[in-house]
Image (spheres, rainbow, N blue to C red):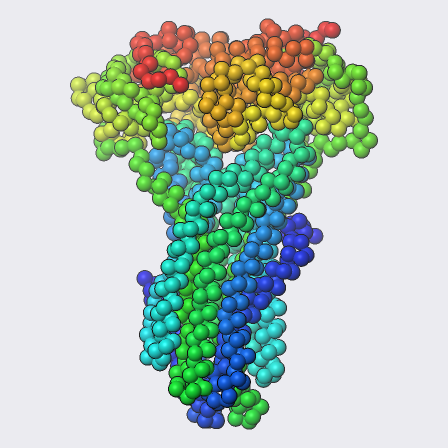
Amino acid sequence: MSDLRRVWQVIKPRRGQGALSVLLASLSLACAIGLIATSAWLISRAWQQPPILALSVAVVSVRALGLGRGVFRYSERLVSHSAALRGLTEIRSQLVDRIAIVAPSGTARLRQGDAMRRFVDDVDTSSEFGLRTVLPASSAVVVGAAVVGLVSWLLPAAGIVLLIGLLVAGVIAPWVTGAVSRRAASREVHLKGQLSAELTSLFADSEDLVAARADGAEIGQVRALDESIRLAERTTAKGMGLAAAIGSAAQGFALIAVILLAVPAVTSGQLDGVNLAVVVLIPLVAFELVTTLPAAAVWLAKSRASSQRIVEILDAPNAVPDPSNPADLPQSAVRRPYLSVRSAAVTWPGETEPAVADVTFELPAGKRVAIVGPSGVGKSSLAAGLVKFAPMTGEVALCDVPITSLTGDRVREVIGYSAQHGHIFDNTIAENIRLARRDATDEQIVAALERVRLGTWVASLPLGIETRVGQFGAQLSGGQRQRLALARMILADPPIAIFDEPTEHLDADTAAALAADILTVMGDRSVIYITHLPYGLELADAVVVLGEEGGSPYASERTVVGS
Amino acid sequence: MAAVAVGIVTTILIIVQAFAITGIVVPVFTRGEGFEQVSTAVVVLTVVVIIRIAVSYLSEWVAFRAAADAKSQLRLGVTEHVLDLGPVWLASRNSAELTALTTRGVDGLDAYFARYLPQLVLAVMVPLSVGVVILTQDLLAAVIVVVTVPLIPIFMILIGMYTRNRVDRQWESLSRLSGHFVDVVVGMTTLKAFGRGRAQAKRVQVIGDEYRKTTMGVLRISFLSSLVLEVLAMLSVAMIAVSIGLRLVEGSMTLEAGLLVLILAPEVYLPLRLVGMHFHAAAEGLGAAQQMIEVLEQDPPRSGLDTDVPDLAQSTISFRQVSVSYLGRDEVALDGLSMVIEPNSITALVGPSGAGKSTALALLERFIDADSGSVEVTSAQGRTQVLTDFQTSAWRGNVAWVGQDPRLVSGSLLDNIRLANRSASEEQVWAALETVDLAHMVRALPEGLATRVGEAGRVFSAGQTRRLALARVFCQPEAGLVLLDEPTAALDAATEQAIAGAIRELARTRTVVVVAHRDLLISVADHVVEISTAVAR
């Protein structure tokens, strides 16, 4: 199944809504054509000066058609946009469903700017596929058939000419556009993903680049990408021009051909003279049906490329699948779990070398172990493995049950994990902490904030815990972010808590204070404290050292926790 | 210009075509004439068709090509200007939004350049000239046109004004709802860690429904303007047709005039309808363009013309009552700072956070301008110049910089250490690594200096990154002034000691200004300047 078809299965409107959109769009187009056709008949007939009553139906119809065009179009736009927005929500929720399963390992390979482009722009592009491609094409077919039928009834040969003209403008012109711009349009989608990624890192690195006067080279890359985009768009422009020319030729020659057929037909009496104006004027308006189809073809090409990029995420492999017959933990043991790690190794999907290997330690209930070692030695990978965010081998058991036989969710209920760059949501302080425990009361949240020494700060804010923290926590300092993450962990209160590099990017005094807090506020819970900095180690019951300086990057265990 | 030429030709073609069709239909219908009598009109029509083909190819191609070029210019213009504005300005903005603006925002201009603008030209020319032709044929139809055509823009403006308020009111909740999805995607690991991953798809559904309802509320109103436009245009055509029909029955009008007016009447309204159709998409693009223009109108830090920067290792730099306010805020970042930076020595800037230490450093790196006061540079020869007289780029060539949050850019480790001085030798690079105590770490890497770093590259700790950035300074011997913002943050005590020693070493040949928090670093300084003027935050 093609990628676009798969995405379409997700976003396509409910049958009723889709059919209604096509019906309304067709009625609207039919009104526009009907208005001119009826008017042409009306004035031709009027010239024959019949009794006025003979014209009354036409007079009423002309007025009704004039009104119908706008009203039907308005209703169609409401129905079709509502359907498109529904599709947008559907595809978003499917994506989130998949990411909920595969994150973080499944999406780790995407560059940040590129990932955003997929989630935002590609999702938007394909969600409008129905609106921009399917709807205009379907309504053109419906109304085109009706118009050709009407003209054929009046003069069969003219009907055939009109049909050929509409097919050329509505099928061949978009096909030519597609042939000229398909590759360009899809290249454009991919190039824009790259440009977005490039700009994201250019802006992020700008301070170092500008200070070193090295921004020129980076801008050169942006310039090169931009040039490729410009050329791709120019090619698309050529396709659009060709389509317009073909459409225009189809219309013009259909008009001339109809005239060449209709004039002798009137002379021979095959066509009633009253209908001559009708047959001649219809080609002038009927091509409105097909003028948007080349753009629809370009949208089809873009939707294909976007769908491919979406499907790559929908199909992102799950590196840590849950076992088919998951075991469970003995209820009694869960409250005071014993974690045992023997010869553990973590290898990220797509990598051949393990990020960390041969790690052995024991964590009895209520103890605190610090895992230290230089950056890049695999401490964070170890943490990811322990909470089943990354595939882990070796003998790792929670209360004597191997974690490979447990579901990820079950493991994470017992082992809480505060990542190095814990995400702060664009929401209030309260909601950011409440995600750790949905039913937490405001009092519990305030209490957690006080335990991480944010109580005074939050109390000083005019809106208190209802203060919004801005996109990605922009309003917070580094220390405040880490403390918010710690407050979450206190509220979640898991039997085992992992903190990954919480003191990174903090100045020494703040770091030392935070480290001490982390190792004390969790009460009788077990703590795994990961750091490459020396703060707080004296408060740990044991220290596991990964990667001796200058030696092998793999673990060498120095201390084993005794029970 | 091209659009105007296309407009003139299109208008002429519309009028000639209408006369030609009338010239064929009327004689054949009314007088039963055959093909020979109308052959001239058919030939004219054929010529019209051929010219139309060429015009539609050219106008479409030119419009989209021009749009592609204009977009490219804007993209590059904004990107370059953002870098000129500098990192301090950039830090005051959301860089993800800026990226979106320069990619997605620019794309929105397609509708404006390629569709709306050319149509706008037609919307002015066609109704006017075709209206005049109608006037020569039929006064009543011309009156209907003259009355209804101006009503269209008036109604659109009125509805636009009415809806704008309602749309603006919805805007904040709309942007919040649409931001929710991205927030969930980015924060999924965190949500999953707290067992909230599975619940999110449902939540996205709920928020999506809310978003759809709010958006439909907005659309119901904003589509009203095109409803009014369509109804006005089509009803006018219908009224003209009916009035022609009634007068033909009475015999008070010729069929020639009647048919001609009937063919021309829709042409009067067509460009107006198309303008209305493209208006929404164009407005979206224009909104983005407005934001880009705002960016382009920001003034970058002043750059003088003087490229002849004296040896800053030997120069004295004096701050005289220098004040800076935060970008876009009333708060003062630096309040009347006066200090003297002596050559060949270490000056430590100390004080509570928020007092303006980093601001003073950013001033010296030319990332920002002072609002008042001046910074003067006095060379060893006694020549005094104002800082802003120097060309920014030339000045920066004489200054080495390590910011508060240094980053490794995408590329190799070697590229990163030579970032400010491409000509540095490998020996210099290794010596620099030795100085910052990282040589053994780099040697232990399988690919050594060729290791890829930055996004998607090898990850280093904050402390290692800082030391790698410091190594850049040692590869840049021609920079007489060295600016360091808390160079020992996130370092352990032993490393801090080593770095402080290296900085001491630097000051033998250069002028060093360092923002310092920790006692050790302050103790190696020759001069300590306390900055505490602003209100600490």
On the picture, is B328 further left or further right than A4?
left
Q: Residue at x 57, y 38 (%)?
A: B181
Q: Residue at x 49, y 13 (%)?
A: A510
Which of these two is toward me, B524 or B17?
Answer: B17
Q: Quadrant of residue B243?
A: bottom left
Can you give x and y, in whole percent of width and height, for residue B192 in the image? 65, 29
Can you give x and y, in whole percent of width and height, for residue B412 in the image? 49, 30
Residue B340 drawn above or below residue A430:
above
Which of these two is toward me, A491 or A399?
Answer: A491
Q: Residue at x 58, y 56 (%)?
A: A80
Can you give x and y, in whole percent of width and height, for residue A398 in the image? 76, 19
Q: Residue at x 61, y 6 (%)?
A: A539
Q: How many marks?
A: 0
* Residue B253 in view here: yes
The C terminus of chain A lies in which quarter of the figure?
A: top right
Can you give x and y, in whole percent of width and height, for residue B361 in the image? 34, 21
* Residue A532 in view here: no
Which of these two is toward me, A8 or B59?
Answer: A8
On the picture, is B520 further left or further right than A257?
left
Residue A21 drawn above or below residue A454:
below
Q: Quadrant of residue B82?
A: top left
